[in-house]
Image (cartoon, grey):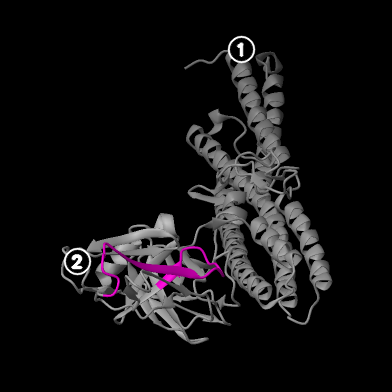
């Protein structure tokens, strides 16, 4: 085959240009440190590089999110620690104020510090993060969550939302807690029920916060512990019509209101339960309720009062004063001649018996009152100390939500009210006992939230470690696909340089060849 001179020249030139192109590519790879300069170099590897780079960018964003979450949670933890300190100090002040030796002025000074602590608590509840957003406003991060009006009423202006941040492909972490959950929705009392004295109590009784001894028996109803007055009533009513030609009538009145009437031709109440039912039909008018326990009829004011309960038994219908007579339920001997009406007063002395009634008025328990002795009913146990008066009462109601500010404000009010007599000291002791229980519930809530914050911080630590490991794997895989092997590339560069130089020298020699040199 014959090859023309032009073919030889162009063939050699093209070979040198190809070699230069390969040398230039190798030089660019060394300069960039990448072995894939364009997708055309390795389409499959280039696609994998893009996928890996996207995964790496997403993981890097997760790490940034985790850093933001850590800062915000650390800020919340700091504020919760301060809130715990405030509540702990107020608890100390409550115990200090419960000292019977203190004067009203000294308690007023304690109340003043409690008021200052309420202001401090309000400031902490309105804490902000580094970006200026409120920590405890829920989704309403730009709205101040807590405010107080001129009447001293505290309100929550946020919502119940809780923001989450993505810190992993399948992991989110809450970066805050709503103020409603931290400060407002706290069960008062012992968490199951709360006890309270009647505001009209006249004695010195102090009730213990109590506890649920048998959860299966506790039904969550409202109860009232009452100290009724014992009577000598008997379940018998007798008429004595001496001449046999009269129809005698009997009437029973409580505090001036007739509650029961019957004549000798009728069927009188024959049990104490029936008599108590007649009396209780008129409780709204008389303000007196009857109880029957262990064969004894007791009476009690529905609202504690020092005014005696007046029971009036009266007879009517007789014509012969000497022969007509009635023997009443309460032992009154009624005579048409000398005593057609008899009043008996049941005064409010020291209590010696108690009854427990539910929200429907049914008796759930009773017994002799002994200071400090357990009062147990329907799974509940409590006790009362001091000397309650007859008709005094205490309520036992299911716990409800109460905010921290109300708890502290009630304590300050109680300390400011003073305690100059045994009755006043009993009210103070009851109020402080409630405050201590409510403060403990508040501390429990703060500790619960702090535990959650700590768990989230631990979750962030764990996820950050996983993210770092994943990033390392991605970077390793990415390096294997696109990073240049410098030793191999430099060796290849040298080989290509030698090849190019040889091609150039051979081209020069071929260019010098001519037939005329041999003629």
Across and down, in percent, residue 458 comes to 59, 63
- Residue 472 in sight: no
Give the residue pinned by disc 1.
6
Residue 139 screen position, x and y as percent = 60, 40
The residue segment tinted magenta is 299-322
Instruction: Determine whether the residue tagged by mark 1 lies in a helix, strand or loop.
Output: helix
Q: Is residue 270 left or right of residue 94?
A: left
Quarter of the rendering containing residue 503: top right
For this rendering, which residue is in front, 83 or 451? Answer: 83
Residue 39 figure quarter: top right
In the picture of the structure, the residue carrying the numbered disc 2 is 264
Q: Secondary structure at mark 2?
A: loop
Q: Tell me, yes or no, if residue 31 can be seen here.
A: yes
Q: Residue at x 67, y 28 (%)?
A: 20
Which of 380 and 191 lies nearest the eye of the viewer?
380
Residue, x 55% and y 32% (percent of image)? 41
Q: Quadrant of the C terminus?
A: top right
* Image side of residue 467 versus residue 271, left or right: right
Is 256 inside the magenta-drawn segment? no
User: Along the line of sight, which residue is nearer the eye, 429 or 343?
Assistant: 343
Whether the magenta-drawn stretch holds residue 318 is answered as yes
Residue at horizontal 38 percent and vertical 63 percent from the top: 253
Q: Earlier in the sequence, mark 1 or mark 2?
A: 1
Q: Is residue 165 above or below residue 313?
A: above
Q: Residue at x 34, y 62 (%)?
A: 280
> Between residues 111 and 445, which one lies in front from this camera angle?
111
Q: Residues within 10 Å of mark 1 (few under 14, many from 20)?
A: few
Residue 481 place in picture, x, y as percent: 55, 44
Q: Nearer the viewer, mark 1 or mark 2?
A: 2
User: Measured from the top left, where is residue 144 in percent x and y?
Assistant: 71, 41
Separation of residues labelled 1 and 2 (CA atoms)? 153 Å
In the figure, is residue 338 to the left or right of 29?
Answer: left
């Amino acid at each position: 085959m014959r090859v023309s001179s032009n073919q030889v020249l162009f063939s050699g030139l093209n070979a040198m240009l190809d070699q230069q192109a390969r040398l230039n590519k190798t030089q660019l790879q060394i300069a960039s440190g990448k072995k894939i300069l364009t997708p055309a170099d390795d389409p499959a590897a280039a696609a994998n590089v893009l996928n890996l780079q996207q995964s790496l960018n997403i993981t890097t964003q997760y790490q940034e999110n985790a850093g933001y979450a850590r800062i915000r949670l650390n800020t919340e933890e700091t504020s919760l620690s301060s809130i715990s300190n405030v509540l702990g100090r107020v608890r100390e002040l409550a115990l200090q104020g419960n000292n019977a030796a203190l004067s009203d002025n000294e308690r007023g000074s304690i109340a003043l510090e409690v008021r200052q602590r309420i202001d401090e608590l309000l400031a902490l509840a309105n804490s902000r993060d580094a970006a200026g957003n409120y920590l405890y406003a829920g989704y309403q991060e730009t709205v101040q969550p807590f405010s107080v009006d001129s009447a001293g009423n505290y309100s929550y202006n946020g919502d119940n939302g809780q923001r989450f941040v993505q810190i992993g492909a399948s992991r989110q972490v809450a970066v805050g807690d709503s103020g409603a959950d931290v400060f407002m929705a706290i069960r008062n009392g012992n968490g199951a029920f709360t006890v309270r004295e009647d505001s009209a109590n006249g004695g010195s009784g102090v009730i213990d916060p109590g506890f649920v001894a048998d959860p299966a028996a506790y039904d969550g109803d409202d109860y009232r512990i009452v100290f009724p007055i014992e009577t000598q009533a008997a379940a018998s009513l007798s008429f004595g019509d001496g001449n046999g030609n009269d129809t005698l009538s009997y009437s029973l009145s409580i505090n001036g209101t007739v509650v029961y009437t019957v004549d000798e031709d009728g069927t009188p109440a024959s049990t104490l339960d029936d008599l108590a039912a007649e009396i209780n039909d008129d409780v709204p008018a008389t303000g007196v309720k009857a109880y029957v326990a262990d064969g004894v009829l007791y009476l009690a004011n529905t609202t504690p009062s020092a005014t005696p309960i007046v029971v009036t038994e009266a007879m009517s219908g007789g014509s012969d004063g000497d022969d007509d007579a009635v023997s009443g339920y309460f032992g009154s001997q009624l005579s048409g001649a000398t005593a057609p009406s008899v009043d008996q007063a049941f005064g409010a002395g020291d209590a010696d018996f108690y009854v427990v009634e539910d929200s429907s008025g049914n008796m759930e328990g009773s017994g002799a009152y002994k200071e400090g002795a357990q009062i147990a009913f329907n799974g509940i146990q409590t006790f009362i100390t001091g000397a309650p008066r007859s008709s005094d009462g205490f309520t036992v109601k299911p716990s409800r939500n109460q905010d921290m500010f109300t708890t502290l404000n009630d304590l300050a009010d109680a300390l400011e009210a003073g305690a100059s007599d045994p009755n006043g000291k009993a009210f103070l002791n009851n109020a402080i006992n409630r405050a201590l229980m409510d403060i403990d519930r508040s501390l429990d809530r703060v500790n619960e939230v702090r535990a959650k914050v700590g768990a989230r911080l631990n979750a962030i630590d764990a996820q950050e470690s996983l993210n770092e490991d994943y990033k390392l794997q991605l970077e390793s895989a990415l390096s294997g696909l696109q990073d240049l092997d410098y030793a191999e590339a430099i060796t290849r560069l040298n080989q290509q340089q030698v090849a190019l130089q040889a091609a150039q020298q051979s081209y020069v020699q071929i260019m010098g060849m001519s037939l005329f040199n041999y003629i």
